[in-house]
Image (cartoon, rainbow, N blue to C red):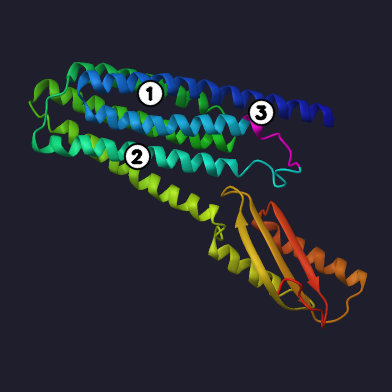
C-alpha cells in the first residue's frame, strides 16, 4: 500500500513538473517574440509587457527547478535542505524586473511629450498571439493542484489581462489618432509591476536578513509557550523563515522545579499541541532547570 502511494506521489510530481516545464518554454519563446515585436511595432506598451513576461519566465523557470529539486533531502552541506535557494531566485528576479521597468519608464516618459504612432496592426496581431499563448498556458497549468501551479496560474491570468489591454488600445488606434495611448499604457503596466516587485523584493531581503516572518505569529507563539505548566519564563525566542513558507523556531524554557521524566514528557506533549496550528518546519526547544545558567548568555 505504501509503495503504491509513493508511486502515485512520484507520478503526480512528474506530471506537475511536466506542466510547469511546458509553460516555461511557452513563456520563454514568447518573451523573445514580444521584445522583437515591441521593437518592430515601436510600442512601449508591448515592451513593458515583455519585461513583465520576462519576470514571469524567470519565476516559472525557478518554479520548475524547485519542483525538480523538491525531492532532494538535507545533507551535510545544506542541513536545512534546498528551500532557501528560492529566495536567491526571487531576489535575482526582482533585480531584473526593477532594472527592466526603469528602462521602460526611461523610454515611455519622453514619449508623453512627443508621442509616436505605433504600428497598430502589428500590436493587434501580437495581442491576439499573447492572449492565445498565455491563455493556453493558464488553462494548462490550472489543471495542477500544487502551490507552485496555483501561483503561476495567477501570473498567467495577469498576462492575459495585460494583452487584452494592448488589444483594446490597438483597436482604438485603428480609428483614432491617439498615439499617446501607447506610452500611457506602458507606464501604467510598469508602475503596476514595480509596486508588486518592490513589495516582494523587500520581503525577500527581510527573510534573507532572518527577520521574523510574522510579528503576530511570534507574539502568539510567545503567549502559548509562557502559559505552559511549570514554565516560569522564556528567552532566546527566535523565529525565522527558510523561504517565506517554511518557518524555524528555537527557544529556551525556564522550568520552575526539577521535573521528572514523566513531567518532561507532558510538557513536550503540550508544546506539540499548542504549536500545531503554526505549521513550523523545524523547532528546537531547550529546557533550563532552576539555577541552571544559560550557556548562550
Disc nearer the start of the sequence (1/3): 3
Query: Dot 2 surroundings within 10 Å: few (below 14), some, or many (20 or more)?
Result: few
Residue 119 appears at what percent x and percent y?
A: 17, 19
Query: Which secondary structure lies at badge 2?
Result: helix
Q: Earlier in the sequence, mark 3 or mark 2?
A: 3
Residue in the image at 53% along x and 33% along y: 62
Badge 3 crowding class, 10 Å Cα cut-off, few under 14, some 14 to 19, many 20 or more, is some
Q: Is residue 145 visible?
A: no
On whether residue 207 falls in the magenta region, the answer is no
Is 176 positioned to the left or the right of 162 in the image? left
- Determine the residue located farthest toward the right in the rendered image: 261
| Label placed on residue 31 | 1
Front residue of this view, candidates 249 and 224: 249
Which residue is under mark 3? 13
Callout count: 3
> Residue 222 location, x and y as percent?
64, 70
Under tag 3, what secondary structure?
helix
CA separation, marks 2 and 1? Answer: 16 Å
The label shown at residue 99 is: 2
Q: Is residue 74 magenta?
A: yes
On screen, 281 above or below 71? below
Q: Magenta stretch?
A: 68-75
Left or right placement of residue 74 versus residue 181 in this view:
right
Q: Are marks 1 and 3 in contact (CB under 8 Å)?
A: no
In this rendering, the label closer to the viewer, 2 or 1: 2
- In the image, residue 191 above or below residue 283: above
- Marks 3 and 2 sit apart, C-alpha to C-alpha, by 34 Å
User: Could you say which is closer to the camera, residue 4 or residue 253?
Assistant: 253
- Please give the name of the residue rendered at 14% of the width and 37% of the height, measured from the top-left corner: 110
Pick whichever of labels 2 and 1 is earlier in the sequence: 1
Helix, strand or loop under label 1: helix
Amino acid at each position: 500500500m505504501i509503495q503504491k502511494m509513493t508511486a502515485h506521489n512520484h507520478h503526480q510530481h512528474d506530471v506537475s513538473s511536466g506542466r510547469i516545464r511546458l509553460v516555461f518554454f511557452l513563456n520563454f519563446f514568447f518573451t523573445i517574440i514580444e521584445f522583437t515585436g515591441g521593437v518592430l511595432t515601436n510600442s512601449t506598451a508591448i515592451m513593458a509587457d515583455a519585461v513583465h513576461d520576462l519576470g514571469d519566465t524567470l519565476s516559472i523557470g525557478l518554479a520548475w527547478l524547485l519542483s525538480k529539486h523538491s525531492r532532494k533531502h538535507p545533507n551535510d552541506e545544506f542541513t536545512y535542505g534546498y528551500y532557501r535557494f528560492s529566495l536567491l531566485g526571487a531576489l535575482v528576479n526582482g533585480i531584473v524586473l526593477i532594472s527592466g521597468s526603469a528602462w521602460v519608464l526611461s523610454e515611455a516618459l519622453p514619449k508623453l511629450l512627443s508621442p509616436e504612432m505605433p504600428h497598430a496592426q502589428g500590436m493587434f496581431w501580437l495581442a491576439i498571439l499573447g492572449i492565445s499563448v498565455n491563455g493556453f498556458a493558464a488553462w494548462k497549468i490550472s489543471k495542477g493542484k500544487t502551490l507552485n501551479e496555483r501561483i503561476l496560474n495567477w501570473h498567467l491570468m495577469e498576462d492575459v489581462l495585460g494583452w487584452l489591454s494592448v488589444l483594446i488600445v490597438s483597436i482604438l488606434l485603428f480609428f483614432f489618432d491617439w498615439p499617446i495611448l501607447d506610452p500611457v499604457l506602458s507606464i501604467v503596466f510598469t508602475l503596476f509591476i514595480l509596486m508588486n516587485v518592490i513589495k516582494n523584493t523587500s520581503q525577500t531581503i527581510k527573510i534573507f536578513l532572518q527577520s521574523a516572518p510574522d510579528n503576530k505569529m511570534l507574539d502568539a507563539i510567545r503567549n502559548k509557550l509562557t502559559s505552559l505548566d511549570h514554565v516560569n519564563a522564556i528567552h532566546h525566542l527566535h523565529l525565522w523563515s527558510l523561504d517565506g513558507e517554511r518557518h524555524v523556531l528555537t527557544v529556551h524554557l525556564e522550568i520552575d522545579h526539577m521535573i521528572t521524566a514523566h513531567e518532561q514528557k507532558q510538557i513536550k506533549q503540550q508544546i506539540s499541541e499548542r504549536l500545531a496550528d503554526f505549521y513550523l518546519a523545524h523547532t528546537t526547544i531547550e529546557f533550563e532547570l532552576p539555577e541552571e545558567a544559560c550557556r548562550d548568555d
